[in-house]
Image (tube, rainbow, N blue to C red):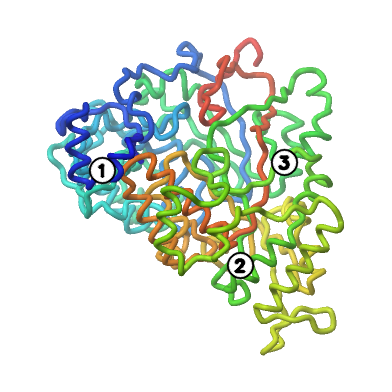
Amino acid sequence: MHATATAAFRKAALAGLLVLLAGTGGRAEDEWRTTSSLIDPDAEQAVFERYDYVNPDAPKGGTLHQIAFGTYDSFNPFIVRGTPAAGLSDFGGLLWETLMAQSPDQPGTSHGLIAEAFKYPPDFSSATYRLNPDARWHDGKPITAEDVIWSLETLKKISPSHMHYFANVKEAVALSDREVEFRFDQAGNRELPHIMGDLPVLPKHWWEGVRPDGTKRDISQPTLEPPLGSGPYKIGQFRPGNDITWERVKDYWGENLPVNIGRNNFDQRRYTYFQDDNAAFLAFKKGGIEDIRRETSTRRWVTEYDFPAVKEGKVIKREFKSGMVQPMQAFVFNLRRPQFADRRVREALTLAYNFEDQNRKHFFGLNKRLGSYFENSELASGGIPQGRELEILEEFRDQLPPELFTQEFKLPVNDTPTSERQHLREAIRLLNEAGWETRGGKLVNKETGEPFRIEFLGASETAEIITDGLIPNLRKLGIDATLRIVDASQYIQRVQNFDFDAVTGVFGQSNSPGNEQRDYWTSRAADTPGSRNIMGIKDPVVDALVDKIIYATDRDELVALTHALDRVLLWNYYTIPQYYQPTIRMAYWNKFGIPEKQPAYTGIDIDSWWIDPAKR
């Protein structure tokens, strides 16, 4: 969303707001902007020459070795079918550029990439993007307005994430070969003109062409033909499911753009696939297969980084601090399954999770409990709703748990055996109220006699540690709780198609929530395979709050609405929040040159590192 305004602005009607903005320094409708910021208006006024943390003289060369898990069978990341190769994402990855590039250093800020500038009218009813005349595909052909329009129309048809993200874009019209106007179905969406810059642009002429064997390409299907791109890297050698090497494009058209100065320094980026994290760690210790490892296992971070290369200074351990919203990592129960439909059941399951014991046994007390879907930001709710947030929630009072208005939301703390027993007794009471009872040590439905079963789905042995704080206590309640570990590809497919009882989900957020919230929480997304609403939430209050967030008139209103959404999600117990690591734990072979500081927002930008010839 856009910058903070005064309380008077928020209470004004939209038309009055726009008049006030125009009278207090608002920018003219026809003024082109080369930087977009949803939070900091001063960023749009400043001249952006490069990120201030990068080394503009960083040398190019060398190979970055990385690992990926599972397998891959496609170079098409935009569809649900198939597993895309490492280096690709539904917003382009290494191969395709977006209209603008999101800043690693400032939340809600983007700078020119394929588009050199954009503008929008005061009522936010449209946005016009002007393409950089130098923008080229790897075959040398120019990127045109026709490519942009085709990309939007195609992605809204085949990609669940883009379908929700750009839902309010009614049409895109070419004003010239280099200008595209996006027209919206409603005015007042302050975020939408900005996030059009996140659109990945694809080559229409390539996707509508034919393969070397003469058959027609189809972007709605998986493919292992390396696609034509526009980004700093292209696909080199690959073996499906085993490895893939990305090669730096030596004549990359955007190399000297401000967003790329001092970045994209590796000549090659090679990914090797592993099925097991323990095997991947052994490969890292050996060297030459993985150069940089983000360590998510606290136990390993504390106890296993004592191998010779660490002691000799060949491998460096380092922690980075991020200013980003901490992703919500949580146990997710599939609300499409009848045993999870009752809120009292979900609260009972939450009471059974013993984070404190798990943190002591497995994490050396170093992890912290998540208490918000927007942890580590001003967007996190707290205390009892008041002020503008209370006004927002009052509209839905009859549809919300009464305690939401009178109690601060707090997750159970199991710091003593007594507290754990108390929480389990309360869980039994709630389950009994919801229609479940214990017979012969098993929890069954009072009417049907059907046992209460939960199969947790995991993709690696790490799932055993993650579920250790919950499954034993569920069994104490008489629930038939089990863990099933499958290979990574099967796991991805089952989650995308909502074929599970319970999984661990991760829900990343930005400091400026908006249109993407549709894909996380709304009723429509619950029925869309591949969406991020893997829980299957269908709640009219959540739907309404998401719409209000998207059309928030200023930063103050956005924060209040996000507090309200956060509180509703928490009090409905749609997930059981787990934990987060307060720092980014990185280990890397000492072959890199690294800027003295890293970006304050993301905490780390590996694209700004380079191979140090002296260390190599």
Q: Nearer the viewer, residue 75 or 576?
A: 576
User: Looking at the rendered structure, which numbered label has been put on residue 367?
Assistant: 3
The quarter of the picture where the C terminus appears is: top right
> At label 3, which amino acid type do we have?
Asn
Q: Residues within 10 Å of mark 3 (few under 14, many from 20)?
A: many
| Furthest residue toward bottom | 447
Q: Which quadrant is home to the N terminus?
A: top left
- Say whether disc 2 or disc 3 marks the residue closer to the N-terminus: 3
Q: Position of residue 601 (x, y in %)?
A: 51, 29
Q: Return the x and y of residue 349 as percentages of the image width and height.
A: 69, 65
* Disc nearer the start of the sequence (1/3): 1
Query: Which label sits in the foreground, 1 or 2?
Result: 2
Q: Is residue 417 left or right of residue 511?
A: right
Label at residue 285: none
For label 1, the residue is 148
Q: Residue at x 80, y 63 (%)?
A: 422
Q: Amino acid at mark 1?
A: Val
Examine the rendered structure and indicate whether residue 455 appears above or below residue 451.
Answer: above
Q: Quadrant of residue 96?
A: top left
Residue type at mark 2? Phe
Q: CA distance from mark 1 to mark 3?
A: 44 Å
